Image (tube, rainbow, N blue to C red):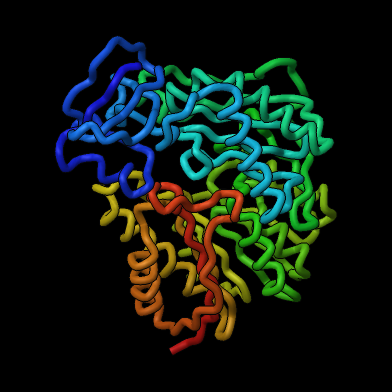
Amino acid sequence: MTTVTLKKGEGRTIKSGGFWVYDNEIESVMGHYKNGDVVFVQDFDAYPLGKGCINADSKIRVRMLTSKDEEIDEAFWKERITRAWEYRKKCVDISSCRVIFGEADGFPGFIVDKYEDVLVVQSLSLGMDRHKDMIIALLREVLASDGIQIRGVYERSDAKEREKEGMEKVKGFIGDSFDTDVKIVENGVRYTVDVANGQKTGFFLDQKYNRLAMQRYCKDAKVLDCFCHTGSFGLNAAYGGAKEVVCVDASDTALATAAVNAKLNGFENIISYREGDAFEILADMKEKNELFDVVILDPPAFTKARDSVKKAAKGYRNINTAGLKLVRDGGIFASCSCSHFMDDELFTKVIKEAASAAHVRLRLIERRHQSPDHPVWLGAENSYYLKFYIFQVFSM
């Protein structure tokens, strides 16, 4: 087996439980290999560090699979899949959930979401791509042992991260075709999920229990769901008893799906929609003195790189200021960030600055994070990304 030797003092990430070896950490690579092959990794002094998949076309040169001297074979992958599935059965509603969450489940760069009886796969690393067919077959087998028959698999490996691995984007059916508008139920709310054309793998499963948490704050409330996408927070607000919900998004396609979901749940007379730039719409609402009992902000990641954090912080500060100005005295304000570069300390600082700019005081009610089917692996910092805070707002 090809042996990768690290430079002295390098490998801090994998030694602290992570999965990535960068190109500039490597002293030598001895042996012949093809990109995607499994290689043996050792420290500068030949101390064994485990095995991983190598890719000379990526700055992440090796993605570790194990710290043990074990075969990366069918039995290895079945044990990993079984462990991931048994964990989900303990901690989340498995009707629709993330079954495999990349590094946090020991599948670096590989994601699988389950929507009822459909799987959606996202393969973002070459090494895992080489094992994709075996993993899917074994996943079908493990789920079938619990009486879950998967009727179809769709691949959404159409993210830009593929290009960093020297791979082309891929999208389409793995196996037989099927209707890609999949019906699911979450927290009592019904949705149609477009697994072929929706964002990411079709739906944001990581907000499942944050959506559920918001239900209890929305009884008889007027609610603003900003950056609503397909209307999930607004639907949970209506399910929780809101008397009026306004959903805002820049995408007419997303709002069209949100309207379909509202009708599916019988909420078409409760929920209304405004298409356009959220900053402009919130400013217009303020000018017209519109106020809400509950305001929910779920913006896209304003930063996906460390060097743009300062600019992103300004964006988060501005949108939170605009949102806070629309909350009635004593009302509820929920805000989130889905960027792992926007850590808890910085996000809290940004919201405090927004509260000052909006001339309000905040009482923190809940500090929430991503759903447990998106577990955080402490050695893989990118596995912790979602912050979701709920406040009560008081005028100065």
Image point (41%, 70%), residue name: 321
- Which one is nearer the viewer's eye here, 375 or 293? 375
Q: Quadrant of residue 294?
A: bottom right
- From the viewer's perspective, tell me whether residue 273 is left or right of residue 162: right
Q: Position of residue 290 (x, y in %)?
A: 57, 72
Image point (74%, 25%), residue name: 152
Answer whether residue 114 is visible to the viewer in this image. Answer: yes
Q: How many marks?
A: 0
Q: Position of residue 259 (x, y in %)?
A: 73, 47
Which image quarter is the N terminus in?
A: top left
- From the viewer's perspective, tell me whether residue 263 is left or right of residue 223: right
Above or below for 177 versus 79: above
Above or below for 333 versus 211: below
Image point (49%, 54%), residue name: 299
Image point (36%, 44%), residue name: 304
Residue extending farthest to the bottom is: 396
Which image quarter is the C terminus in?
A: bottom left
Above or below for 393 versus 165: below
Q: Position of residue 190 (x, y in %)?
A: 79, 49
- From the viewer's perspective, tell me whether residue 2 is left or right of residue 73: left
Answer whether residue 289 is visible to the viewer in this image. Answer: no
Q: Quadrant of residue 138?
A: top right
- Which one is nearer the viewer's eye here, 251 or 79? 79
Q: Position of residue 320 (x, y in %)?
A: 43, 66
